[in-house]
């Protein structure tokens, strides 16, 4: 079966076929044209021949007649030369005749007399009859043929002479005799190629050359021969015959013996002869056909060449066409491709636009998510602040209870409050750490630390917990561990504490063991790799649950652990922290047998001295406040400045610091701090980070600008409740010497004091040993058993009991009230200013501190309203701020005035 491709004529075949067709057309055309041309040529040649031959015949006739005329003239001359003497005797006449014969090269030069006697140079003759001459009546020269029937024909030319007397006779005619050959000597009778024959016939058809029709005819006589011929159209024997008879010129075409011929005839002057030209047409035809054949061959060759040229041209044209078509196709294809590409591009563009709008949407969504995340972080941070603030109060007050009571029951309650508070703080810290990790902003802060101190802290932290649960706590510390290390000790401590806490949490009986081994010591780099391992004999973990260990908020064996406190965050935080330290947490656990959590970390070595034998018992250094022989940090006479915008915080810190016997000064804003710095030198400053107008960092910067020397020698410790999003690290970078998390842990605070103010000057013993005085606030006007003056109780805006609860004792409460009253005017102005200048964020901060301050003195109503304004500020609800600020500020100022008008506050220093 033919394929589609085969069925299509390929271009080469088209060209070949085209050329074949052209060649055939050209050949046929050439042949038919050749034939037509041949015929035309024949006619033309014939016409030309007729002209040419009639011309030729005419000329020959002239030649013959001029020869005859010459002879006649010669005879006239010869007769003219005849003198009388020549006629005087026969000898003289013959002599004369002899001379003439020689002179004119004549065969015979004779005279005829009236008797018909012929006088020749050799004598007389009487055969006049042979000459067919009418000698008696001859008036004109006459030409006759002698021996017409024989081959020895002679031409006789006779002229009349004027009755010349000779010997008694009268000579009337003079004639001469010429050989026929001599006459015809100048006339070629036959052409070279036997195509034409010239001949002379008598009127009767006798050929003077003995050749009839160029030798073709078998007859002797032309007229007889012509009787046998077949005539062409327009010619006839009769016509020919009458022409001959009448001595008129003409032509006749005929075929004789199958050969076509044409005969031209012209009468010769003075004779009764006809000069003829015969032409063999067959030969002409042959020649013409040869010519036309060669013309045809040439034409065919020409046609073939033309066809080839055409072929080449056709091929070139075709190729050109194909090229053009291909180019057009290519162009079309490229245009199509371009169109497609353009379409694709347009689609891509549309897609990109769509993507762009999508990504814009996504960006917006991301922004919204980030905003939400930020809001979440802010929320967590704020929550931590919010939660830590009351916990600070709780733990602070609790700490004071623990310090000031000897009642075992109360001590035990306080202990419970403390442990619950600590665990609550732990949870908050975990949540903060987790949000920090989630936000990708957990950073490590490197510091030099003592490995001994770290281990001691860990031991002290865990000892009571294990003891409480009846577990054995074992610390196996490699003696080769260097004493001084550098790393993020807080995070290292957090990691190990997490693991130890878990071990304690999930172990009912048996052991909790911490092993710290020096795995590798790279002296060159000055670093050590520690292997830390925490193992327990607890409940263990099912192998199939090991995967879920690090999933945030996921807790294993929930049923069994339902009574164990926890958030499910500890291990994921631990793992993330270890990742930051380029390490990883490994777990080995046998269900119901126990677990081992371990990791390796590199720490730089700052003091290569080995820690040596480190016995657990030796680790018990710090004693708790409720143990026998309480020991506090004291530094009598040292001056401390506490800066916090929240009065209650100032009170708690002041309360906690009481026992240190230091001179405690407070400032409720950055500005106040700057003022105080002008006159005083402090041994240490505790400064809140989050304050309105001028926050802790700004205050520190201003202090550094204003009092560079003082700042240089004064340790300034940041207090921060919102430990989220790298705030602590930021604080250190900004130039704080250290930081304390709020709520302030008394032990941490004392550590800080030890570190920056110096070793404890006096160790207090017993609860009354270090009863500090409030330096700035003292209540004089105590009128009521509750301790609160009547005039304060009379202020309706105040829930005094609540204020007292917040502040702890009447002194602190009165101090808080006084501070509150003093700050009213400034804060109210600030609030109004922020609103008019549209500084909504600052507004919210002021409202926030107003809320805290109002709550801390028991001005619950105002506190609530301040809180509403704070929220409105955070949300940017300007309409609400505009509507409510006026009333709020008015009531706030009214309360301030009432307080300022009281005697009890006025009597405070
Ligand atoms: P949690 O606050 O619940 O302790 P963690 O992230 O610290 O959260 O631990 C996740 C879970 O891993 C725990 O709920 C507990 O089921 C399991 N787990 C952690 N440590 C131990 C251990 N030492 N022994 C047994 N189970 C443990």
Image (tube, rainbow, N blue to C red):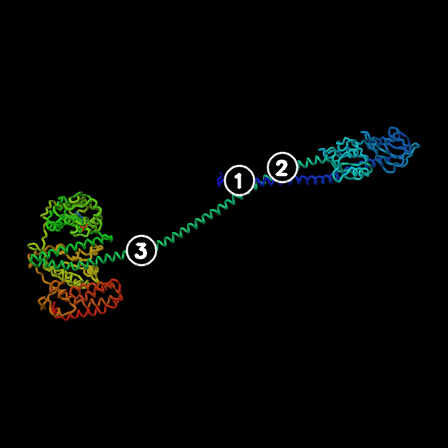
Q: Quadrant of the C terminus?
A: bottom left
Disc nearer the start of the sequence (3/1): 1
Left or right of 337 in this view: 457: left
Distance from mark 3 CB to nearest ligand 1 atom below 8 Å: no
* Image coordinates for residue 464, horizontal then vertical, percent: 11, 51
Asked which quadrant contains residue 849, the reply is: bottom left
* Label placed on residue 399: none
Numbered disc in front, either 1 or 2: 1
* Image coordinates for residue 288, horizontal then vertical, percent: 68, 37
Q: Residues within 10 Å of mark 1 (few under 14, many from 20)?
A: few
Disc nearer the start of the sequence (3/2): 2
Numbered disc in front, either 3 or 1: 1
Disc nearer the start of the sequence (1/2): 1
The residue to which callout 2 is attached is 297
Query: Distance from label 3 to label 2 (Cα)?
Result: 91 Å
- Classify mark 2: helix, strand or loop: helix
Please identify the residue farthest to the right as the structure is shown: 168
As drawn, 560 above or below 844 = above
In the image, 208 versus 849, the foreground residue is 849
The residue to which callout 1 is attached is 13
Query: Distance from label 1 to label 2 (Cα)?
Result: 27 Å
- Classify mark 3: helix, strand or loop: helix
Q: How many marks?
A: 3
Q: Residues within 10 Å of mark 3 (few under 14, many from 20)?
A: some
Left or right of 592 in this view: 232: right
The residue to which callout 3 is attached is 363
* Image coordinates for residue 264, horizontal then vertical, percent: 76, 38
């Amino acid at each position: 079966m033919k394929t589609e491709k085969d069925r299509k004529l390929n271009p080469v075949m088209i060209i070949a076929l085209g050329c074949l067709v052209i060649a055939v057309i050209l050949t046929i055309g050439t042949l038919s044209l050749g034939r037509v041309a041949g015929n035309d040529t024949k006619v033309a040649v014939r016409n030309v021949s007729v002209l040419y031959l009639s011309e030729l015949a005419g000329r020959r006739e002239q030649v013959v007649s001029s020869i005859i005329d010459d002879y006649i003239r010669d005879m006239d001359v010869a007769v003219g030369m005849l003198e009388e003497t020549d006629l005087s005797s026969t000898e003289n006449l013959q002599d004369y005749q002899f001379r003439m014969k020689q002179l004119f090269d004549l065969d015979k030069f004779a005279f005829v007399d009236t008797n018909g006697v012929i006088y020749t140079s050799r004598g007389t003759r009487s055969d006049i009859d042979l000459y067919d001459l009418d000698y008696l009546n001859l008036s004109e020269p006459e030409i006759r043929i002698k021996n017409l029937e024989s081959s020895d024909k002679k031409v006789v030319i006779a002229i009349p002479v004027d009755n010349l007397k000779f010997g008694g006779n009268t000579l009337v005619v003079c004639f001469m005799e010429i050989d026929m050959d001599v006459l015809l000597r100048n006339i070629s009778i036959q052409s070279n190629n036997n195509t034409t024959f010239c001949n002379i016939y008598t009127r009767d058809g006798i050929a003077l050359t003995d050749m009839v029709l160029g030798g073709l005819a078998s007859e002797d006589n032309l007229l007889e021969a012509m009787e046998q011929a077949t005539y062409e159209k327009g010619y006839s024997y009769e016509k020919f015959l009458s022409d001959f008879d009448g001595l008129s010129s003409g032509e006749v075409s005929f075929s004789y013996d199958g050969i076509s011929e044409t005969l031209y005839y012209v009468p010769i002057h003075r004779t009764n002869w006809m000069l003829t030209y015969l032409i063999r047409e067959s030969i002409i035809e042959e020649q013409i056909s040869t010519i036309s054949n060669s013309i045809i061959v040439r034409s065919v060759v020409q046609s073939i060449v033309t066809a080839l040229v055409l072929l080449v041209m056709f091929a070139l044209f075709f190729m050109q066409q194909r090229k053009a078509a291909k180019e057009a196709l290519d162009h079309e294809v490229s245009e199509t491709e371009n169109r497609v590409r353009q379409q694709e591009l347009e689609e891509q563009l549309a897609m990109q636009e769509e993507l762009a709008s999508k990504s814009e949407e996504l960006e917006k969504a991301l922004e919204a998510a980030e905003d939400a995340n930020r809001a979440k972080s802010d929320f967590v941070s704020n929550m931590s602040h919010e939660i830590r603030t009351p916990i600070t109060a709780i733990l602070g007050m609790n700490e004071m209870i623990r310090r000031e009571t000897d009642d075992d029951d109360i001590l035990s309650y306080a202990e419970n409050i403390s442990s619950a508070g600590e665990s609550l703080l732990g949870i908050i810290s975990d949540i903060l750490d987790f949000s920090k990790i989630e936000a990708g902003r957990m950073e490590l802060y490197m510091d030099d630390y003592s490995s001994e101190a770290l281990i001691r802290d860990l031991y002290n932290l865990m000892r009571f917990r294990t003891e409480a649960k009846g577990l054995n706590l074992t610390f196996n510390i490699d003696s080769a561990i260097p004493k001084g290390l550098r790393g993020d000790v807080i995070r290292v401590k957090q990691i190990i504490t997490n693991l130890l806490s878990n071990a304690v949490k999930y172990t009912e009986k048996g052991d909790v063991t911490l092993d710290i081994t020096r795995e590798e010591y790279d002296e060159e780099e000055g670093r050590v790799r520690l292997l830390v391992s925490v193992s327990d004999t607890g409940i263990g973990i099912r192998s199939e649950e090991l995967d879920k260990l690090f999933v945030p908020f996921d807790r294993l064996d929930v049923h069994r652990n339902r009574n164990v406190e926890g958030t499910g965050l500890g291990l994921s935080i631990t793992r993330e922290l270890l990742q930051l330290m380029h390490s990883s947490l490994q777990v080995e656990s046998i269900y119901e047998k126990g677990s081992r959590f371990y990791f390796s970390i590199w720490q730089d070595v700052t003091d290569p001295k080995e820690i040596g034998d480190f016995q657990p018992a030796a680790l018990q250094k710090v004693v708790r406040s409720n143990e026998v022989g309480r020991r506090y940090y004291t530094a009598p006479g040292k001056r401390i400045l506490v800066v916090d915008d929240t009065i209650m915080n100032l009170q708690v810190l002041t309360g906690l610091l009481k026992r240190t016997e230091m001179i405690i000064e407070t400032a409720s804003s950055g500005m106040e701090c700057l003022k105080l710095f002008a006159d005083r030198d402090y041994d240490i400053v505790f400064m809140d980070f989050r304050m309105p107008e001028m926050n802790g960092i700004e205050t520190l910067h201003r202090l550094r600008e204003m009092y560079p020397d003082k700042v240089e020698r004064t340790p300034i410790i940041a207090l921060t409740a919102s430990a989220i999003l790298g705030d602590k690290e930021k604080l250190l970078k900004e130039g704080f010497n250290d930081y304390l998390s709020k709520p302030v842990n008394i032990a941490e605070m004392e550590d800080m004091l030890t570190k920056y103010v110096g070793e404890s000057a006096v160790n207090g013993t017993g609860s009354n040993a270090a009863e500090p005085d409030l330096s700035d606030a003292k209540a004089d006007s105590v009128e009521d058993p509750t301790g609160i003056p009547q005039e304060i109780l009379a202020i309706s805006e105040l829930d005094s009991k609540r204020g007292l609860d917040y502040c702890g004792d009447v002194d602190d409460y009165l101090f808080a009230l006084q501070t509150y009253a003093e700050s009213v005017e400034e804060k109210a102005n600030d609030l109004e200013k922020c609103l008019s200048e549209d500084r909504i964020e600052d507004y919210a901060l002021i409202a926030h501190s107003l809320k805290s301050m109002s709550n801390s003195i028991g001005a619950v109503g105002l506190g609530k309203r301040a809180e509403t304004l704070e929220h409105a500020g955070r949300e940017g609800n300007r309409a609400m701020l505009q509507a409510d600020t006026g009333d709020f500020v008015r009531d706030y100022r009214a309360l301030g005035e009432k307080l300022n008008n009281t005697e009890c506050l006025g009597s405070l220093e």
